[in-house]
Every structure is written in structure tokens, then in C-alpha cells.
Image (cartoon, grey):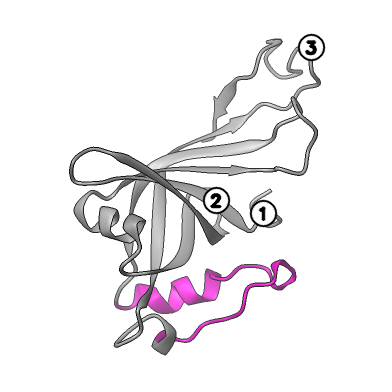
Amino acid sequence: MLDTNGFLTLGTVDPDGRPWTSPVYFAASGLREFYWVSRTDARHSGNLAERPHVSIVVFDSSVRPFHGRALYAAGTAGEVQGDDLERGLQVYPGPGDRGGGSLTLGDVTGSSPYRLYRATATSVWVLCPREPGQPCPLHGRANDHRTAVE
């Protein structure tokens, strides 16, 4: 699902504690690292400068109602700097068939208004798949529920 979905919903909090969510085009490295590019003056970028804690949801909006598939994560995020930039630009923008264009260091450093950001998830959950009205084959539960990913 992470390779086929182009966008995640990023949850941040401003200095006054007000939540803010933003859709961002992303690329993942495994289940715990998420990269995106944003302007430094975007509200979520400013929020991250003050409070690095984030929540993330990646979901498949193409499925029928009550057939949801989703990954939920919580962790911290911030601007990627130094030697980590080259690694991040190897991950971002992800698989070529999703339509993202590759970037150079100059696109996300210096006078460019854009920066590469990375969220590192400390907790990850997936929505257990099940047919409506039927129990989850893994847990026997007939309601929507999440299971932690190790």
C-alpha cells in the first residue's frame, strides 16, 4: 500500500496546541520512515519547527466503503539535513510509476523555498482487513480495529 499510494495525511500541532492535517506526496523507506518535500513557509513545516511530534495515516481511497485498508503511525519529524539528505533523495520521490519527479540537493537546500522532511515512526498500526459484517480472520473481531506492527 505504501508503494501504490502517493499521499499521506500528516498531522501536526501548532505552538498553541491546535491540530493541523495536510496531505503530502510521500515516499516510504520501510514501515517507519516517511519522506516528503514541502515549502518552509507551509503551516505544517512551521508546526514541525516548534513541535516535532506527528501522526500519519496512509489509506486506500479506491476501495468500497467498509473495505478500508490503512496504515497509522505516530512519531517525530523534521527537516532532513547534512549527510542524511543524499539518502533521503534516494528514497524520495518513490517508485517511478507513481509520477513523482526526482530532485537534486539544489532543489531542497540553499535559497530554494523547499526542504526534504522525514518522519520516523515510533509506533505503527494497520487496519485489519475484513469483509463488512464478517470477523477479522486474524483476530475474530467483527468491528474495525488496528493491530500494532512490530
Tell me the tag on residue 8: 2
Q: How many numbered marks, from 0 up? A: 3
Q: Residues within 10 Å of mark 3 (few under 14, many from 20)?
A: few
Residue 86 is left or right of residue 47, and the answer is right
Q: Secondary structure at mark 1?
A: loop
Q: Disc 3 to disc 2, how far (Cα)?
A: 28 Å
Residue nearer the viewer, 21 or 37: 21
**Please, what is the three-letter code of the amino acid marked with disc 1?**
Asn
User: Is residue 64 placed above or below 139 in the rendered structure?
Assistant: below
- First of labels 1, 3 by sequence position: 1
Secondary element at tag 3: loop
Q: Which residue is denoted by mark 3 in the rendering? A: 133
Decide whether residue 123 is among the magenta residues.
no
Is 89 magenta? The answer is: yes
Residue drawn at x 71%, y 56% is 4
Q: Residue at x 28, y 55 (%)?
A: 48
Q: Label 3 sits on what residue type? A: Gly
> Are the two marked residues, 1 and 3, in contact with CB atoms closer than 8 angstroms?
no
Label 2's element? strand
Does residue 70 lie above or below 111 as drawn?
Answer: above
Q: Which mark is residue 5?
A: 1
Residue 143 is tagged as none
Image coords of residue 128 (percent x, y): 67, 26
Q: Is residue 126 above or below residue 117?
A: above
Residue 33 horizontal/vertical position (percent): 47, 55
The residue lying at 67 percent from left, 57 percent from top is 3
Spatial separation of the CA atoms under disc 2 and disc 1? 8 Å
Q: Quadrant of residue 84?
A: bottom left
Q: Which residues are magenta?
A: 82-105
Work out whether mark 3 precedes mark 2 in sequence or the reverse, and give the earlier one: 2
104 to 40, vertically: above or below: below
